Image (spheres, rainbow, N blue to C red):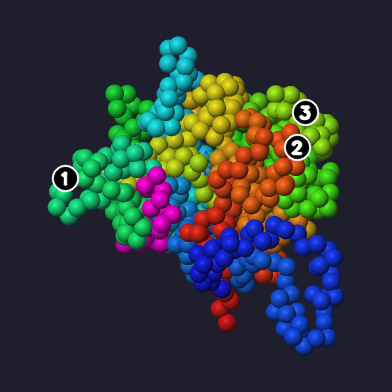
Amino acid sequence: MKNRNPSIRKAVATCLALAYLLPIPASIAQSPAVQSSSAPQDVAVVKYDNSFEIFKPVWGLKGMVATEQHLATQAGAEILRQGGNAVDAAVAVGFALAVVLPNAGNLGGGGFMLIHDSAKSESIALDFREVAPASATRDMYLDDKGNVIAGKSTRTPYSVGVPGTVAGLTQALSEHGTMPLAKVMAPAIKLATEGFRVSPVLAEQFNNQRTHLERWPATKAIFFKHKSPASTCRLEECPAAEIEPYKSGDLLIQKDLAHSLNLIAQHGAKGFYEGEIAKNIVRSLTDSVSTMTLADLSNYKTVKRKPVEGTYRGIKILSMPAPSSGGIHLIQMLNLLERYPLQDYGFGSAKSIHLMAESARLAYADRAEHLGDPEFFKVPGKGLVSKKYADSISPLINIEKSTPSKNIKAGQPQNYESDQTTHFSVMDDRGNVVSTTYTLNLNFGSGIVAGGTGILLNNEMDDFSIKPGVANAFGLVGGDANAVAPGKRPLSSMTPVILMRDGQPWIATGSPGGARIITTVLQNIVNVIDFKMNIAEAASMPRMHHQWLPDFLRVERGISPDTIEKLKAMGHDVKVMPTMGRVQTVQYENKQFYGASDPRNPDGSAIGIEQKK
Ligand code: DON
């Protein structure tokens, strides 16, 4: 069944969000007038108004797709309807988002795909994170006095890591999909060739990022148009006064991108990592020096990893191991929270928020010290996710008071073993599940389109710790573990998750949001498991975030003023700031599928697949 009008559903859901925040007192919920009544006028109330759920997920019988852009959701749903499996559909979504969500969807970025392949009875974590080019050095973003050169790791050819997306998507398809590449890429090629209408959300992104985008001629030629029909300059060369970014309602056609997609559809990953596209990428990143070479591109390799595993109140959690910090710290926080009766404390209570914030404070302190690319640094992953480690650090949480971050240092886990991103989730009726988060890093990445390709390039190099103790674009600090080195993957926070119940896939979810991804996914899980919300409710609730440093508790609008007062009395520096994360969730429950696309982005949607007859 289709989600008929996601924008309206989401607007209504958002308006109702505040009302939901007040839990129904048990005395009212169980009052005889609500439960039953012999008065005839109350019967109708009982019949039509008997649910406590303000938000409802989308429903389907044969599968589910949830993404941040409804045209990409449709692409995935179409592939499922044609008989493709969840991986076929996810790959279709990945390519389609590169067209219709240019600020985050990508060919020129990287990410992580968690796959549960039911036929092979295995779960894998496919790492297609960008890597630092061979020319990268530890101090490449510092001047000769050792100071950070502002913007070098975010807004220059030096900010671009070797992209992994095309290698990742094509490998997932060939190893776990059933359809030919050209077939799953067809919707993306059509959207790039025929164009699509720019939404108000995307138009706002173009406008906000205008100065960032108009610095690069090839970028200007794609996302800008002449202000007046009288203007005749070539877009690449037009003065800023003569052009404007695409507006809401405009038809955006991306011919160069369609050409690149066709090359990939014909030649597979080689079409991207060798030949015309590769040459154009290298040319675009070569100024006086070449920051990326053809060898960097042809040497790019994905890594198949074992998902990091944990349990929370009996539910198995599968997520992304290093070089993402996401899965490890998600499980670490859940291990800490498992010892508290959050359900009794209630959603949105000062106590629940405080405990989540304190768990996050400890986890993010560890992140700064212990996490990096496992090929370059011994990451104590198993130690960090062990229940024993949670036992050892849990005394650092004071249930009544916040502990200043200056008093918290990274712990010593046992070494047991030697603001742009997007998430999409897919399930099919054969038991396959895909949970993918991929990114260009910041909005539109580096802003650089490789001339002739239509492909925007990432600025993932900023996710390295460019100097110990100096914060990246998300305020995250790090040290040796995440220092720049050639061929190394920068540390990530992306947290694609699959939850397993009784050995079967139950829920897949994930989110964008930089440093805030991990706490967003945490709350989505706690809302379902502890607060018994359905996945649409869980997605809609206001969120909190703490990341150790800087030491403040960030909350979304919708946490009540008296709760904020209580949190302040506990010692938290509370700041109400813009929304965090945009989760995309699918669920299999009672032999049916449910989906929810976060109302924070009205462009997203979930589509359930109908039964043919
Ligand atoms: O890998 C990471 O953690 C970051 N590059 C993610 C960036 C992000 O989520 C930005 N957007 N919302």
Residue 326 lies, in percent from the top left, at 63, 40
Residue 555 relative to residue 221: left or right: right
Q: Is mark 1 within 8 Å of ligand 1?
A: no
Q: Is residue 203 magenta?
A: yes
- Which residue is denoted by mark 1 in the rendering? 233
Q: Which residue is mark 3?
A: 414
At a point 38% along the width and 42% down the height, the residue shown is 209
Q: Dot 2, how many residues are within 10 Å of its Cα: few (below 14), some (14-19), or many (20+)?
A: few
Q: Earlier in the sequence, mark 2 or mark 1?
A: 1
SS at circle 1? loop
Describe the element under mark 3 as helix, strand or loop. loop
> Which segment is the magenta one?
186-208
Residue at the spot of label 2: 569
The answer, for residue 72, to whether it is visible in the render is yes
Where, by quadrant of the figure, is residue 197 drawn?
A: bottom left
Q: Amino acid at mark 2?
A: Ala
Q: Please determine whether, in this image, residue 564 is positioned above or below residue 161.
A: below
Whether residue 549 is in magenta: the answer is no
Q: Residue at x 67, y 70 (%)?
A: 592
- Assign a secondary structure to mark 2: helix
Question: Callout 3, which amino acid?
Answer: Gln
Residue 519 in percent (x, y) is at: 65, 43
Question: Eyeballing the image, is 453 above or below 540?
Answer: above
Front position in the image: 349 or 140? 349
Is 337 positioned to the left or the right of 179 in the image? Answer: right
User: Between 411 and 111, which is closer to the camera in this rendering?
Assistant: 411
Quadrant location, the N terminus: bottom right
**Amino acid type at mark 1:** Cys
Mark drawn on residue 268: none
- Between the residue at mark 3 and the residue at mark 1, the CA separation in whole angstroms equals 63 Å
Q: State which quarter of the image contains the C terminus.
A: bottom right
Label 1: how many Cα within 10 Å (few below 14, some 14–19, many 20+): few
